[in-house]
Image (spheres, helix red, strand yellow):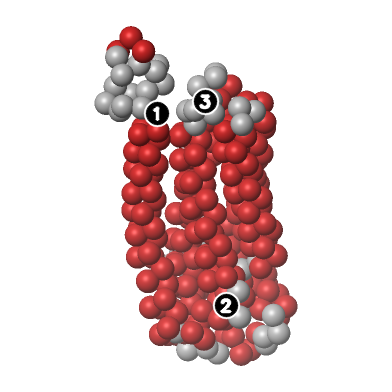
């Protein structure tokens, strides 16, 4: 291909758009693999502690709000659908629809973070923080926590008499909870920035049925974010 006819959307070191698309997508898959390896280490830590202390994890998970977790799961599944639809829309040259679908994806992501903020705020007011949960859960005069325990069928007298080692291991559960969900939340925030960037580029006319690799790679990243949460929800919220 001569330089006079070289596509303006084609980088100089590629022969054609198809080769460029394949290279970009391969690079994205490699990046996603590193993300999977990153979270795998945390999942191994989770599996190790849970296998050694199954009763602790089952008890501590009852302080998580399953309903909010389920809503967040539904929200992310919807956002994954709109992200995939956006890829199809750009393939069909439907520019306005692409912008709309990416916008819905951003709104879903913001909704997810809002719900997660509600959960974190609740944990903060109960004192269920990293390194502090074992004291707050078992503090006899903490009315909110006592109420939460009673709602799940436990007697407060049984809780306060638990041995110190059980209390310490319960704190480890919340440490893992905040580590996993916090890092996932950071990835959601990065996904919001990515989708807004794609929206801006789409409105500028950077994408076409022949050149849409950025949208495709962005959707792949978002699918990984959704997939990680699909694992986190049952592992953290549905233990009991």
Percent x, y of residue 160: 57, 85
Percent x, y of residue 197: 51, 30
Is 113 rendered above or below residue 21? below
How many marks the image carries: the answer is 3
Percent x, y of residue 12: 29, 22
* Residue 208 visible in the current orientation: yes
Bin the neighbour count of mark 2 within 10 Å (Cα to Cα): few under 14, some 14-19, many 20 and up.
some
Identify the residue at the far left of this view: 13
Percent x, y of residue 188: 52, 47
Q: In which quadrant will I find the N terminus?
A: top left
Displayed quadrant of residue 122:
bottom right
- 223 or 115, which is in the foreground? 223
Displayed quadrant of residue 83:
top right
Describe the element under mark 2 as helix, strand or loop. loop
Residue at 48% x, 46% y: name it. Answer: 220
Q: CA distance from mark 1 to mark 3?
A: 12 Å
Q: Which residue is mark 3?
A: 207
Q: In which quadrant will I find the C terminus?
A: bottom right
Is 60 rendered above or below residue 94? below
Q: Which residue is mark 2?
A: 239
Circle number at residue 2:
none
- 8 or 47, which is in the foreground? 8
- 61 or 146, which is in the foreground? 61
Q: Nearer the viewer, mark 1 or mark 3?
A: 1
Residue at 49% x, 31% y: name it. Answer: 212
Q: Which residue is mark 1?
A: 17
- 205 or 103, which is in the foreground? 205
Q: Nearer the viewer, mark 2 or mark 3?
A: 3
């Amino acid at each position: 291909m001569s330089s006079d006819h070289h596509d303006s959307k084609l980088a100089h070191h590629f022969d054609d758009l198809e080769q460029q698309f394949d290279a970009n997508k391969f690079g994205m898959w490699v990046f996603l693999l590193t993300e999977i390896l990153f979270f795998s280490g945390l999942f191994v830590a989770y599996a190790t502690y849970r296998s050694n202390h199954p009763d602790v994890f089952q008890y501590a998970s009852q302080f998580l709000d399953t309903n909010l977790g389920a809503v967040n799961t539904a929200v992310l599944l919807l956002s994954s659908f709109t992200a995939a639809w956006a890829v199809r829309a750009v393939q069909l040259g439907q520019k306005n629809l692409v912008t709309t679908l990416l916008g819905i994806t951003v709104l879903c992501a913001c909704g997810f973070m809002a719900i997660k903020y509600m959960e974190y705020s609740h944990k903060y007011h109960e004192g269920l923080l990293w390194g502090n949960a074992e004291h707050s859960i078992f503090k006899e005069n903490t009315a909110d926590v006592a109420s939460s325990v009673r709602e799940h069928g436990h007697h407060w007298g049984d809780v306060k008499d638990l041995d110190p080692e059980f209390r310490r291991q319960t704190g480890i559960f919340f440490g893992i909870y905040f580590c996993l969900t916090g890092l996932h939340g950071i990835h959601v925030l990065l996904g919001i920035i990515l989708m807004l960037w794609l929206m801006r580029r789409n409105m500028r006319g950077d994408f076409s049925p022949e050149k849409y690799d950025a949208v495709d790679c962005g959707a792949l990243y978002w699918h990984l974010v959704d997939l990680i949460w699909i694992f986190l929800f049952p592992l953290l919220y549905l233990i009991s």
